[in-house]
Image (spheres, coloured by chain):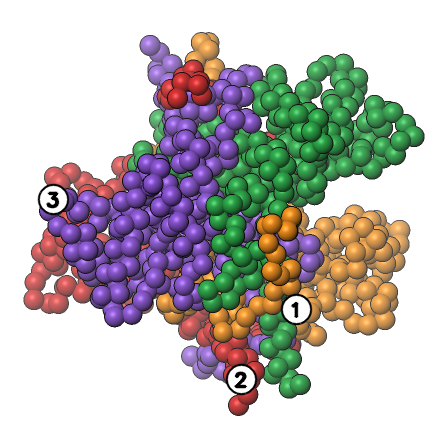
Chain colours: A orange, B red, C purple, D green
Amino acid sequence: MSDAQSLLDSAKAWWSTDIIDIHPGKIGIRGYPIQDLIGKLTFPQMIWLMVRGDVPSKQQAQLLEAALVASVDHGPHAPSIAIARMAVTCGVDLNNAMASGINVLGDIHGGPGQQCMELYEQIAAAHDGTRELADVADDVLGGFIGAHGKIVPGFGHRFHPIDPRVEPLLGLVANAASQQVVSGHYAAIGRAVEAALRRRTNKPIPMNIDGVTAVIFCELGFPPPMGRGLFILSRSVGILAHAWEEMQNQHRIKGPMPKEIPYTYTGPRDRKLSDQ
Amino acid sequence: MSDAQSLLDSAKAWWSTDIIDIHPGKIGIRGYPIQDLIGKLTFPQMIWLMVRGDVPSKQQAQLLEAALVASVDHGPHAPSIAIARMAVTCGVDLNNAMASGINVLGDIHGGPGQQCMELYEQIAAAHDGTRELADVADDVLGGFIGAHGKIVPGFGHRFHPIDPRVEPLLGLVANAASQQVVSGHYAAIGRAVEAALRRRTNKPIPMNIDGVTAVIFCELGFPPPMGRGLFILSRSVGILAHAWEEMQNQHRIKGPMPKEIPYTYTGPRDRKLSDQ
Amino acid sequence: MSDAQSLLDSAKAWWSTDIIDIHPGKIGIRGYPIQDLIGKLTFPQMIWLMVRGDVPSKQQAQLLEAALVASVDHGPHAPSIAIARMAVTCGVDLNNAMASGINVLGDIHGGPGQQCMELYEQIAAAHDGTRELADVADDVLGGFIGAHGKIVPGFGHRFHPIDPRVEPLLGLVANAASQQVVSGHYAAIGRAVEAALRRRTNKPIPMNIDGVTAVIFCELGFPPPMGRGLFILSRSVGILAHAWEEMQNQHRIKGPMPKEIPYTYTGPRDRKLSDQ
Amino acid sequence: MSDAQSLLDSAKAWWSTDIIDIHPGKIGIRGYPIQDLIGKLTFPQMIWLMVRGDVPSKQQAQLLEAALVASVDHGPHAPSIAIARMAVTCGVDLNNAMASGINVLGDIHGGPGQQCMELYEQIAAAHDGTRELADVADDVLGGFIGAHGKIVPGFGHRFHPIDPRVEPLLGLVANAASQQVVSGHYAAIGRAVEAALRRRTNKPIPMNIDGVTAVIFCELGFPPPMGRGLFILSRSVGILAHAWEEMQNQHRIKGPMPKEIPYTYTGPRDRKLSDQ
């Protein structure tokens, strides 16, 4: 084989993928012709197929769908939303505004679902049948707090005493478990963490939206990084809706507060270069 | 009223929104308590509610859903996908990789659906009943090409002679029209543009994915900028799936081609500062 | 030549560039060995060399440098800065925070310098020696306002009655013109636009930072898109400094206003799905 | 004090900063009137002032400047550069293209300088005078490799056997040390790491651009995160230059390889939904 052929082969392999196969007039998604999927799969089923490679049942997809519906927005004061709204007033288009907003769904703003899934998986792995779940939760939670600090992702909310999205979602998980769509094991783990936190702190630190979507994503078999990925798909809807609402207002260069409200300058004053 | 109160009121108004109302323990989306929507609305219905303010019928949402399903991916050679794959090899997380990819869904890569919707709306506005649709399409298309150049968004494909996503989607539109879910008017307009292009160029330049999703979005009453916004929500799925696949490969600093294949340097050589 | 060789050649040509040539142990920038530039060129000279392909004189580079120094920051209420500060509190790193901020330096927030250069170049092209510059400025400005609206990029400021950055920079241009480093022609054009605006509106709308840096960039021969590009390089310094200051504060999920100040919800209330 | 006043005060304090003070007609940077800085400070001095709060000497700034000059570009195959070039072909503007590129200067692509500074600072802290620097370097390096893996940031290069940017920069450090501009201590630490790596591996793993700029930034007293921040300012120049070059080519939707070269599909084939 010539050197050219060898290099060309490495170029072809460089972008190899299991996801999509394209030829003129043909598009295969994970091995399915695209025309077989259009009108047949729901959008959540397509999300699942793309990320994981197989088509989920309708019931599995409905549970995923409920999580996607629940997380779309938490108001214009969330940095991801505020950023997208400010962006469109600076003369960029929706794709750019969405990108600047999605970009900040980082470890703190977009990562708690993923981190909570990691916590649940640690408990699941440690819960080998020799001990009560409550004891395992106490131990693993103690180690987690020792490693990561006292803010436990998925539990407590700085705004909502009770997160109104939690019970409806847990109800759907319970229903799915009763129909053997999921095991219900991670719902029990989530409840166990909640109880362990209360024992540890003597106050209620209830499960929040990240904690309950982490239950759902673990029940459905998604790996922890998808806790972030799926949240991004959901919150992108809110980012789009807010960017579009702001775009219609036609503000120009919208800052974080009205310009009549000054910010406080806290640095030195009246310096001269000659002072040096 | 004090000045402080007045400034505070302007601060409160600065981030006013029609989309979401939040109080401790309560989240209202477009006036609906979030707990009434979870498990009740499909994800496409939620997208519609967030962007437009009202809940669509199941049939309307299914047509939107088919369009969202159809556009998720067009392979790792698409810049948006390639960028996200390269990004994760540089040590950033999924939100950042998705942002860098989504950011490039600009006028050329993510805008044709929006531009095609604008073309369709121009034809719809000009088709006042006094002339045949074909004549109107010829005229408006001529003006559009004069203003924007010969690449007509939504028609023709540099890779697919026939885009396999078009007929299934048009079939769903026809079905929805037969049930009075949509009017079918924009499907007729899309077909009229296709025919006008053929008359104009003497060759087939068939409708592509952007042209057919533009039909659907117009049929459902979305404004043209949502052609871009909804496409972004769809393509984000592909961007996530590819970023995640690449992340599992654990490459480090993946460039566009294998490093064994050099690029060509085309500039000057062997210059010296003293030559100046 | 084999097909493989032909494809491989097209791969090599795909990323061809005039800017940089790299071989093991060798890096050439625009034809200069990198080791000849380090310690010899100033950073502004290197910016010029990279963007334009030749090394400017020290005097040219000093004028560019003054423009780069002048534009680094305009406070935390500028969206680009506020976005970067909010970003670091969301758990992303400096590169991501800077990206989200730089991304919004769009047509309105980062584009006025570029647009002003286009205006100046239109005047320069129309000023063919047959008419007074003032008359040409009146005409071109009239056309510009007709096409783009009454906000003339580079003139007037919503905050500063007189922009304190303008006179020092114009002084440097005058000095450079007196030494034949630049022609001074674009400084005259800028002043002519200022005078034409006053005649047109009967009030002072003085040159601002975008108008004066546009003078400098035009005097130095940069094309209009570099008005945006060079501004980005300058403002990136402010974005970095603010992101870094905020990072040291260790806030978590900083929104645009303190969470004690609510935003106003302006949408419908108390809707029920069953109302439909 | 009224509640409104109290809330307003918290709003004013929300965006407080030590960096910039703005009033109508006045801009103060770290306490200096902007007009005193324009034409007086070099761009590297301004970068230093913005990030650190004081004005460096010319000699300190020249050393910083050399590091900024050295890192501007490493060719179109670097993901940050390739991404920016692809971006402009998708119909976005220079600010967006630069943002997508800068965004990927993450832990692997943009972080080694920062990580290397952390390593140097660990050695500096451990080198308390009781032991030889070589022994300290051996120990700290061993711990570092144990914690982070065998790729030591700042040393070795997958492309250059000898990085041509290193010796000129070390020469400038030596010169600055001879004039008491810097201590030279971190240059010694860098050399000690290089020697320790050779002892450890029995092969040369020479200092690279990240290792030598880390020396300079540590010598000048920058904290490790600025290793990333300053690199971003430098590499932004290359990203801009390449984006601008590509923009002039007027390609549309440039993928990572010519479209004649297919990628390899490695997933399943010919699946049917009914197979489930």
Residue at (53% x, 41% y) in the render: D42
Instruction: First in sequence, mark 2 or 3: give its number.
Output: 2
Q: Chain of mark 2?
A: B
Quadrant of the snapshot with the N terminus of chain C:
top left
Q: CA distance from mark 1 to mark 2?
A: 41 Å
Residue A166's tag is 1
Residue at (60% x, 45% y) in the render: D48
Q: CA distance from mark 2 to mark 3?
A: 65 Å
| Position of residue B229 measured from the top left corner of the image (x, y, whole percent) | 40, 57
| Position of residue D84 measured from the top left corner of the image (x, y, whole percent) | 44, 39
The amino acid sitting under disc 3 is Arg
Quadrant of the snapshot with the C terminus of chain C:
bottom left
Q: CA distance from mark 1 to mark 3?
A: 58 Å
Label 3: state its secondary structure: helix
Residue, disc 2: B3
Q: Chain of mark 1?
A: A
Instruction: Please state which of residues A137 and B85 is positioned toward the viewer in this rendering.
Output: B85
Label 2: state its secondary structure: helix
Does the rendering let one see residue C214? yes
Q: Which callout, 1 or 2, points to the residue nearer the camera? A: 2
